[in-house]
Image (tube, grey):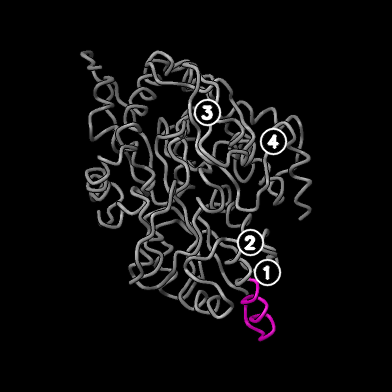
Amino acid sequence: MAHSGKARHLTLGFMPLTDSATLIAAKEKGFAADEGLDLTLMRETSWANIRDRVMLGHFDAAHMLGPMPVASTLGVGHVDVPMIAPFSLSLGGNAITLSLQVFAAMEREGATLRSEPAEMGKALVQVITRRRADGLAPLTLAVVYPYSGHNYELRYWLSASGIHPDNDVRLIVLPPSFMGDAMAKGQIDGFCAGEPWNSLCVDAGTGVLAVTKSALWRQGPEKVLGFGVDFPKREPERFAALLRALSRAAQWAGNPANHGELAELLARPGYVAAPANILIRALSGKILRQKGATAEVLPDFLVLHAHATNFPWQSHALWFYSQMVRWGQVTYSADMAAKIGQVYRPDLYRAVLSETGIDLPRASAKVEGALKNPTGVASRRGTMVLGPDGFFDGRLFDPDRLEAYIAGFGD
């Protein structure tokens, strides 16, 4: 719907990642302008900068890691600044890339490029055991931020494989854009990051894309649009206009017919600034795991719109909290769990987008990992289809049994 009034300005922060696509499409394809918004997108180099600049009011909102507004609201790892996430930007899109040397050692233990995560994990256990017996230093693996899906999915995979992430390997934090250089210099043995940084490492011939997020937790939550908690009340018109613009942008970005054009937009110097022929891999799900290998089609590698991607499920926020407790970043309490129920905001999503005619789920949380196939669930129009969401180890996460779920890991 074209907007004839004076443009209202908004500044959004983002990181140079393929899953910033919806924000970039909102500006470049005119969806924000149609809502009367003059959007400025500011590229940042680290997730800590994104957090700080939203906290300080430099940005009105930002492309954020899903756990970031949860951690900020709980005041863990930094100051206590309540934030909200009323819009999910993506599911999936990450991968664990290992150095050629580590993967070659895993191949000697039976792993192949086609191995499932559990088989990859078994091979890595053998590599770590041999290194320890030979008196070598533990492997160094990098993640992008302590409160990130990357940290939790890497830990989830390692632990399920029998590798203690704090005792058997060394975990460090690096910005995603530094991963390739650190790998090339031999400073790290692997990393978990979003695209295009895994594919760039593959093309540089320094790493192998070993495990995808979609293989660990199909359609697992990734980025959100994060705001300070008071923004919707302080700026209700700009808030609603932005959510409407992003909803249309996500529909456009999620359409495979637009992926070629979208890759060209993301490739521009002010945005992701990576080659379009690399960026389109994540958008299309056609992933090259090793230089010279044949591309594989991986369903749901990165999801920008389908299957209620943009709905902020409260069960996603609570799963992130479960991992924060599991790994000692915060203690469990019923009060904290209730506080997290106010971070992901399906009520705000519904209040704004119900007027646009898009379908909306009736529930605000779900049992994660329960859907083995596309499944119809109750929605405003009757039924909407959600995609498969299984964890690779078959666990289920019931947000109503949060404490029991955490205790079930026994780490």
Report x, y in % for residue 298. Answer: 42, 53
For the residues labelled 2 and 1, the Cα–Cα distance comes to 9 Å
Badge 3, how many Cα within 10 Å: few under 14, some, many 20+?
some
- The residue identified by callout 4 is 398
Amino acid type assigned to the residue bearing label 4 in the image: Asp
Amino acid type assigned to the residue bearing label 2 in the image: Leu
Report x, y in % for residue 97. Answer: 47, 64
Marks 1 and 3 in Cβ contact (< 8 Å)? no
- The residue identified by callout 1 is 168
Q: Earlier in the sequence, mark 1 or mark 3?
A: 1
- The residue identified by callout 2 is 158
Inspect the magenta stretch and tell me whether residue 61 lies in it.
Answer: no
For the residues labelled 2 and 3, the Cα–Cα distance comes to 33 Å
- Foreground: disc 2 or disc 1: 2
Inspect the magenta stretch and tell me whether residue 132 lies in it.
Answer: yes
Q: Earlier in the sequence, mark 4 or mark 1?
A: 1
SS assignment at label 3: strand
Badge 1, how many Cα within 10 Å: few under 14, some, many 20+?
some
**Front one among 273 and 303:** 303
Amino acid type assigned to the residue bearing label 1 in the image: Asp
For the residues labelled 4 and 3, the Cα–Cα distance comes to 19 Å
Badge 2, how many Cα within 10 Å: few under 14, some, many 20+?
many
Report x, y in % for residue 31. Answer: 27, 27
Marks 2 and 1 in Cβ contact (< 8 Å)? yes
